[in-house]
Structure formats: structure tokens, C-alpha cells
């Protein structure tokens, strides 16, 4: 399959999953702070063109926010402590192994499924709660929180109290029905990431 076919496959999978969460994008999206390392034209945005970001300055525990297809894309550099904590959460999650294929490309599960990423330390997610499309807050520190005394880091949606871990996996017993989505993406180099196109040869 050529690269165009791979790209189209990733976009189709992504569009299928995003249908459920785009309705309330406007309300949640305006509150997200932007770090725009590359700003495509309005025409390119409407066409869903891929965007490229330089992540060389992304520090551990921080988040870069981009816009792709009118949605916020979160790129987060996770610490070793966060990665070590992720396997401890499976029993508290609705879908710990990300079994719903529409939630993410298959290649982000080929390593350790807890990470949902190509590179363990770098997480790439669509920053919209899968309940009503609000934008969750990042609570990346491992410390007790008012909404969870055993918090291991993750995302908390103040609108209706949905919670997700630092891989975007949804907790059990919250309104959000599925994990946060992972968009198609690949790395051009160790410091350059492309959102909107699957890796060459990805199934």
C-alpha cells in the first residue's frame, strides 16, 4: 500500500472515532492555551492537511498544544515515574488495553499497551473529552487530588468529572464512554513529529 493509502486509512479511522466528540468542540476548545510551532493556512486546515511540530524543546511533564482538523492535539512528554505508574491502573479503567480499534491507530499498541504511543515517553492525544467534547485539564503530578486520593497523573474534565490516565485511558464509572483518541502520526526525526499521517508501511 502506498503512502496515500496509509494516510487515507488513518484519516478514515480517526474520522469514525471523532464523530462522537466534535459536537461541543467550541465550548471546550477556546480554553486551551496554544503553543503553535507550525501554523498551516486556513485552506490547509479545512483540507485536513498534516501539520509538523518541532518537539526538541518539550520538557518532561509539559504539554504542547497544536490544532489539526479544528481539534486540539496534545503532545506530552511523560516522566519515568508516570510510565511506571500506568500499569498500576488497569483495574480502575474501563478499557485498559484499548480494545476499541476506533480509538487509536493499531501501531501505538504494538509496544507496551499501557503507553498507547510510538515512543513511550511521548503521548499524542486529541484533547477533547469523549463525553461531550470539553477540554480536560492536565493533572500530571502523582499526588492526591480532591477527585481522586490515589491519583497517578492524568486528565480531569471539570464539566462532568470524567477522568483519564496519562495515556488517555478512561476510568471506569465516569460519563466518558471511551478512551481519548490518538490521531494518526509519525516521526520525521527524533525531534520532529507529523500529525495526520501514519508511519510509512503502517497496517
Image: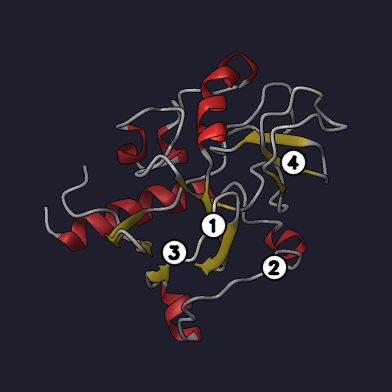
Mark 4 or 1, nearer chain start: 1
Assess whether mark 4 and mark 3 are in contact (beta carbons under 8 angstroms).
no
Residue 19: image x %, image y %?
Answer: 55, 51
Q: Nearer the viewer, mark 3 or mark 4?
A: 3
Vertical order, 194 against 15 (above or below): below
- The numbered mark at residue 33 is 2
Q: Residue furthest right?
A: 146
**Distance CA(mark 2)–CA(mark 1):** 16 Å
Q: Nearer the viewer, mark 4 or mark 1?
A: 1
**Distance CA(mark 3)–CA(mark 1):** 9 Å
Q: Which residue is mark 3?
A: 55
**Distance CA(mark 3)–CA(mark 4):** 24 Å
- The numbered mark at residue 194 is none
Between residues 177 and 114, which one lies in front from this camera angle?
Answer: 114
Q: Nearer the viewer, mark 2 or mark 1?
A: 1
Left or right, residue 23 beside residue 43: right
SS class, disc 2: loop
**Which residue is depicted at the point 49% across and 66% down?**
57
SS class, disc 1: loop
Between residues 79 and 98, which one lies in front from this camera angle?
Answer: 79
Mark 4 or 2, nearer chain start: 2
**Total numbered labels:** 4
**Distance CA(mark 4)–CA(mark 1):** 21 Å
Left or right, residue 146 beside residue 75: right
Label 2 environment density (alpha carbons within 10 Å; few <14, some 14–19, many ≥20): few
Q: Quadrant of residue 195?
A: bottom left
**Distance CA(mark 2)–CA(mark 3):** 17 Å
Mark 2 or 1, nearer chain start: 2
Between residues 70 and 51, which one lies in front from this camera angle?
Answer: 51
Q: Which residue is mark 1?
A: 59
Q: Which residue is mark 4?
A: 156
Amino acid at each position: 500500500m502506498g503512502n496515500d493509502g496509509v494516510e487515507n486509512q488513518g484519516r478514515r479511522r480517526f474520522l469514525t472515532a471523532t464523530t462522537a466528540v466534535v459536537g461541543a468542540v467550541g465550548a471546550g476548545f477556546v480554553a486551551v492555551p496554544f503553543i503553535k510551532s507550525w501554523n498551516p493556512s486556513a485552506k490547509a486546515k479545512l483540507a485536513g492537511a498534516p501539520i509538523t511540530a518541532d518537539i526538541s524543546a518539550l520538557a518532561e511533564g509539559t504539554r504542547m498544544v497544536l490544532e489539526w482538523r479544528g481539534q486540539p492535539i496534545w503532545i506530552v512528554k511523560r516522566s519515568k515515574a508516570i510510565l511506571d505508574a500506568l500499569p498500576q491502573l488497569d483495574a480502575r479503567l474501563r478499557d485498559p488495553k484499548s480494545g476499541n480499534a476506533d480509538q487509536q491507530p493499531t501501531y501505538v499498541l504494538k509496544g507496551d499497551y499501557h503507553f498507547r504511543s510510538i515512543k513511550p515517553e511521548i503521548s499524542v492525544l486529541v484533547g477533547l473529552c469523549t463525553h461531550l467534547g470539553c477540554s480536560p485539564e492536565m493533572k500530571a503530578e502523582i499526588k492526591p487530588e480532591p477527585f481522586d486520593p490515589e491519583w497517578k497523573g492524568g486528565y480531569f474534565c471539570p464539566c462532568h468529572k470524567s477522568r483519564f490516565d496519562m495515556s488517555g485511558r478512561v476510568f471506569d464509572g465516569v460519563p466518558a464512554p471511551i478512551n481519548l483518541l490518538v490521531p494518526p502520526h509519525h516521526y520525521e526525526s527524533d525531534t520532529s513529529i507529523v500529525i495526520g499521517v501514519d508511519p510509512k508501511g503502517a497496517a
